[in-house]
Each structure stands twice: as C-alpha cells, then as structure tokens.
Image (tube, rainbow, N blue to C red):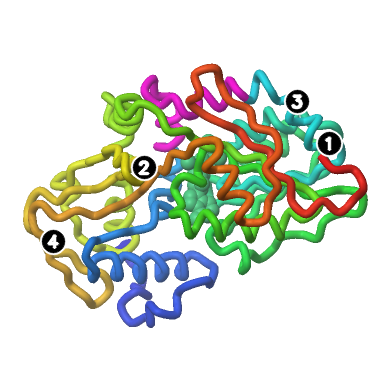
Amino acid sequence: MLAGAANPIENADLSEAAGRDGGNDHRLAFARDLTQCLAETPHIISPKYFYDEAGSLLFERICELPEYYVTRTELDLLQRDLPAMAQTIGPNAEVLEFGAGSLLKARLLLRALESPRRFIAMDISGAHLQAAAAQLQREFPTVEIIALEGDFNALDRLQGLPAIEPGSRRVGFFPGSTVGNLSPLEANRFLADSARLLAGGGLLIGVDLVKSPMVLHSAYNDAAGVTAAFNRNVLVRANRELDAGFDIDSFAHYAFYEPRLQRIEMHLICLRDQTVQIADRRFTLRAGESIHTENSRKYTVEGFRTLAASAGFTAKAVWCDPMQLFSLHWLASGVTGSEER
Ligand SMILES: C[S@@+](CC[C@H](N)C(=O)[O-])C[C@H]1O[C@@H](n2cnc3c(N)ncnc32)[C@H](O)[C@@H]1O
C-alpha cells in the first residue's frame, strides 16, 4: 500500500465497484476482479489490467521488437493503402479510436483523411492517454482532439462522448488487433455496440490472421523478455495498488498457440507456493498453478467478416499484406444517406 494513504480496499464492498470512475474506483474494480480471479479455478484476469502507465510503455516496446510482426505489418499496410482507406471513409469524419495507446497510427490516419473534424482517443490507461492526446493536439492544432478514458467492453455505459457535429459522421478506428483479446462473445458485443455508436459511418479495424504457429510463438516469446515483463506487470500493479504481496520473480511467463481455439494464450505460472492478500481475503497459490492473463485470437478474413456481419456491420473492403499476416477491414454501419460507402 502507498505510504500514508488510507486503504479504501480494506472495508469496501467490492461488488459495487464496477462501472464507477475515479482512481479509488479503478482500484476497487481491480481488487474485485483479482479476488474473483483467485477465488475461482482456472484463475483468469482481464488483460485490461496490464495497462497502467508502465504497462502502456511496455506495450510500446513490444511494438518495436523484431519478433512482433503485428505492428510493423499493420503500419506497412497503412502506409500502402491509407489513400484508399481515406477515400472510403470520406471527408469531415469524426474519428473515435478504441484502445488508442500511443496514437502512432492515428497520426497516419489523420494525415490521410480529408478535413477530419474531430479525433476522440479512448483508452483505459488514463495518464498515458492524456499525454498522448496532448501531444497529438500539438501536432494537429486544427483538429479537435478529445481524450476519453473508458472501457471498450462497456460501450453501453460510456460517459463523456460528445454529440456528433452536424455535417460530420462518426468513424471508428480499432487497430492493433486488440479485438483479438476479446472472447467471441465479447467481440460480438463490442462490434454490436460500436455498430450502434457508429451508425451512418463505419469501423476501420485491424485483425491479425491465422498463420504459422512458429511465427506466432516467437512474437509472444521475444528474446529480450519484454513480453514477459508486460505479462508480469499485472502482478507488479497488484502489489503496488492493492498491496497483494505476489513474489513477482516466482512467476514464469508462458505463452503458446492453441490451434483448436486459434489463439495465443498468455499465462503466469506460479513456481513456488505463496499466499497473497486482496482486501481482507487471503489466497494460497501452489507451485504449478496458472493465472491466465490474455488471449490473442487469430482470425481468417472470412471468419472475421462473418463475425462482423453477425454483429450488424456490413463487411466491405479488406486490405491484406502480401504474406497474409494481417488484415484491415472497413465495416459499414447502418448507412443512412443515399451514398453507400
Ligand atoms: C494492443 S494495445 C493497441 C494500442 C494501439 N491501438 C495500437 O494499435 O498500437 C491495446 C490498447 O487498448 C487499451 N485497452 C486495453 N483494454 C482496454 C479496455 N477494456 N478498454 C479501453 N482500452 C483498453 C490499452 O491501454 C492499449 O492502449
């Protein structure tokens, strides 16, 4: 626990923490979800808890790793095909990026679009988001830039989204294959909610494709150990924010491709028995137990188009790199005007 701070976790009703905002409520929600994770078997925690400021910076380092083809390939695709994507999106767009991160790809999109009106960067990692959005505003002084802290798994409860301006239409941007971190049910709900939010516009979304398991394996097991540090960050965060008492070094990063579910699974394997404490509950983890921290689902182009259609989008153009590693999809949502894009 932070020196000198009262511990609001101790006496809080963790079941009420969901959906509220503010620093303490973030901690309460984390405490509630980690309690549930440790109380249940298998132990599963949402990957959103990787992303505090340190986690966001670790993810940026992952994006630069030689093994992590995902960012490099998507950036190449954007460089090559953004003129066509921008034409498809059209002028006067208001862009809403989900899970915005460093905003590196947003810069490329904003440069390619004709007269973008507004850019709303949405992310769960509040401090990192504010800094990235402020920098973007300096680079694009004529575009209104808004930082919106929120959870893309709860778009129906999203607060602070401004009304769309007359003459503009809202376009979603969801690069990075972050959609792969969602279960099929969550992905369907995210797509259905975003289709409603983006009615009359559409969603440009990056989706990682099924490929050689060896390529996938090395992408999530880099030689420098950055992905391992990113994985362990959830425990670092639990110790700092919740005073949980994990022995961080006794957890092994374990990531593998599960071909039947077409996903990378990321786990932390406990290597020695230990007891941790969340609020007033103690949990014993035995050597060999796993905490399942992330899935990264891989799709076929057709499989993703079918998923998008089942959630209410009309799957339109698809852009792929020559090696078919990665795809970017334009999904139209409930086109209202006479001109269908
Ligand atoms: C895989 S990174 C992608 C970052 C960036 N869009 C890119 O393409 O490089 C996932 C991003 O989504 C954010 N994120 C993760 N879970 C989230 C959630 N439930 N709601 C909102 N943002 C989330 C993270 O903070 C991070 O910035």
Does mark 4 have its CB less than 8 Å from ligand 1? no
Amino acid type of disc 4?
A: Leu
Let me know if residue 126 appears in the view: no
Let me know if residue 218 appears in the view: yes
Does mark 2 have its CB less than 8 Å from ligand 1? no
Query: Which residue is under mark 2?
Result: 263
Disc 3 + disc 4, Cβ < 8 Å? no
Disc 1 + disc 3, Cβ < 8 Å? no
Secondary element under disc 4, as helix, strand or loop, is: strand
Determine whether 194 is above or below 267 in the image: below
Mark found first going from the N terminus, 1 or 4: 1
Q: Which mark is residue 143?
A: none
Query: Which residue is under mark 4?
Result: 285
- The residue mark sitting in front, 1 or 4, is 1
* Residue placed most toward the observer, 264 or 284: 264
Cα–Cα gap, marks 1 and 4: 54 Å
Secondary element under disc 2, as helix, strand or loop, is: strand
Residue 59 is situated, as x and y percent measured from the top left of the image, at 43, 37
Amino acid type of disc 2?
A: Arg
Cα–Cα gap, marks 3 and 4: 52 Å
Query: Which residue is under mark 1?
Result: 90
- The residue mark sitting in front, 2 or 1, is 2
Amino acid type of disc 3?
A: Ala
Quadrant occupied by the C terminus: top right
